[in-house]
Image (cartoon, rainbow, N blue to C red):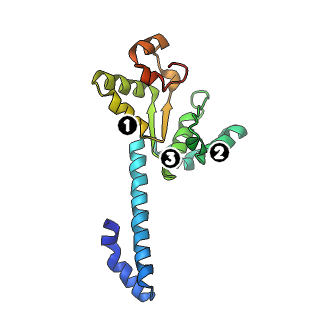
């Protein structure tokens, strides 16, 4: 418990000065440890998510979006769709902010304690094909299934025809893609 190790002396000094009980001293110390761990976990999940960190909620101008879309984004930030296992599709013209919205939602979900992965659809297909080629597909699928949310960006830019997908992907992967399995 690194935070407790680093702060127990200064916390004890403060507790003596404030005439805090031993229980209060321990509670304060363990709360600091818990908060440090939570903060470190969030930082780690943000790094591992591969989200664009500059595309966060603080830089998202909801006024640029139509009112109904802005309301939907606010609703998605709550994350209820995750517990309901619902898919979310974001449509719009190039440059309309779809990736920014997705990254902002992803970052907020991580801050709420959820594990999120971001990838372009092209990169995901490459990773799946490489895992299949290397006979590591089961492990790769297990890894991505550990995420609460998987954000696939630029789905419209995939240049693989459905018949090609059907011959290259096993049924277990196609089952993840509605309409293809």
Q: Earlier in the sequence, mark 3 or mark 2?
A: 2
Nearer the observer, 69 or 33: 33
Residue at disc 2, secondary structure: helix
Task: Tell me: residue 10, above or below residue 100.
Answer: below
Residue found 43% across the figure and 80% down from its top: 23
Task: Tell me: residue 88, above or below residue 38.
Answer: above
- Circle 2 is placed at which residue position? 75
CA separation in Å, label 1 and label 3: 20 Å
Residue at disc 1, secondary structure: helix
> On the picture, is 18 further left or further right than 126?
right
CA separation in Å, label 2 and label 1: 28 Å
Residue found 50% across the figure and 46% down from its top: 107
Task: Tell me: residue 89, above or below residue 108.
Answer: above
CA separation in Å, label 3 and label 2: 15 Å
Q: Residues within 10 Å of mark 3 (few under 14, many from 20)?
A: many
Residue at disc 3, secondary structure: helix
Query: Is label 1 in contact with label 3 (beta carbons under 8 Å)?
Result: no
- Circle 1 is placed at which residue position? 143
> On the picture, is 74 further left or further right than 46?
right
- Circle 3 is placed at which residue position? 107
């Amino acid at each position: 418990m690194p935070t407790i190790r680093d702060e127990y002396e200064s916390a004890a000094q403060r507790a003596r000065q404030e005439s805090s009980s031993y229980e209060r001293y321990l509670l304060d110390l363990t709360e600091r440890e818990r908060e440090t761990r939570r903060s470190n976990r969030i930082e780690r999940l943000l790094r591992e998510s591969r989200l664009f960190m500059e595309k966060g909620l603080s830089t998202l101008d909801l006024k640029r979006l139509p009112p109904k879309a802005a309301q939907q984004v606010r609703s998605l930030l709550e994350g209820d769709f995750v517990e309901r296992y619902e898919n979310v599709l974001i449509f719009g013209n190039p440059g309309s902010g779809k990736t920014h919205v997705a990254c902002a939602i992803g970052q907020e979900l991580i801050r709420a304690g959820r594990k999120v992965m971001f990838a372009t659809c092209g990169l995901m297909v490459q990773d799946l094909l490489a895992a299949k080629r290397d006979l590591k597909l089961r492990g790769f699928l297990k890894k991505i299934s550990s995420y609460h949310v998987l954000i696939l960006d630029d789905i419209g830019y995939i240049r693989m025809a459905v018949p090609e997908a059907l011959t290259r992907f096993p049924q277990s992967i196609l089952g993840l893609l509605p309409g293809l399995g």
